[in-house]
Image: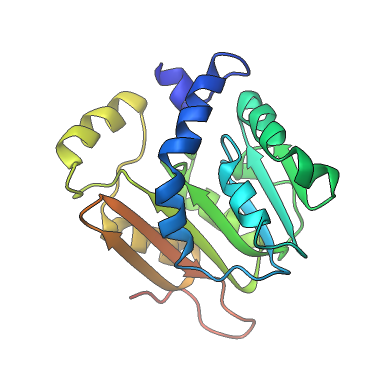
Amino acid sequence: MIRQVRKPTRWVGRFFLWGMNRSHSSLTDWGLKHVPIERSSSILDVGCGGGRTIQKMAAIATAGEVCGVDYSEGSVAASRAVNAKGIKAGRVEIHHASVSQLPFPDRKFDLVTAVETHYYWPDLPRDAREVLRVTKPGGVLIVIAESYKGSKLDALQAVAMRALGAAHMTLDEHRAWLAAAGFSDVQVDEERGKGWMCVTGRRALDGAPSGTSS
């Protein structure tokens, strides 16, 4: 079960991915309210899982493009199935790849999203810098999560995160993480009653200072 949560397989993992699409939907909707999504936006979803976040954003960015990456072949297959129409229309691409080596050129995306996935990134500091690389100047990264140190459910979550070998950070640690990677205007928002959080950071415009946070 732990393996399926971290890296769903093509067949057994389909059950977990279906459940993730359902359980993360409201969290995703809340988080995406904190970032602009335009009709022509170029968007990357890191750790795209079952593909529901891509589907949501592609429905808004109808004149743009939405790409997804996941290191699990099972997730890639499931995400491609969910987004078959968008892929056929040439507006969606989903790649089997790791956040540590994104298969995209520098400064490509207006928005990068990561929903319930950064816990498992191999090297959080380095991987955040890799995301920064593919973000356009003025573009935004948002990390959305419902497991973090200090949440209302922390007593239970801490045990699960240790079992998964996953990162478990405080709100302040999330803020410092993105600022240290070079993102500017770093902000953390919390929906305390639901145990949700998101952290956003912007790639500074050329010539502007980076790493500031609030």
The answer to whether any part of residue 90 appears in the image is: yes
Q: Where, quadrant-wise, is the C terminus in this rendering? A: bottom left
Residue 104, position as x, y percentages in the image: 75, 52
Q: Residue at x 36, y 34 (%)?
A: 166
- Front in this rendered view, residue 20 or 157: 20
Residue 28, position as x, y percentages in the image: 46, 51
Q: Residue at x 70, y 32 (%)?
A: 81
Colouring mode (rainbow / by chain / secondary structure / one colour)? rainbow
The answer to whether any part of residue 120 appears in the image is: no
Residue at the limit of the structure toward the bottom, as seen here:
207
Q: 48 above or below 58? A: above
Residue 209, position as x, y percentages in the image: 51, 82
The number of numbered discs placed on residues in the rendered structure image is 0
- Front in this rendered view, residue 20 or 177: 20
Q: Residue at x 56, y 47 (%)?
A: 53
Determine which quarter of the picture holds residue 177: bottom left
Q: 138 above or below 157? A: below
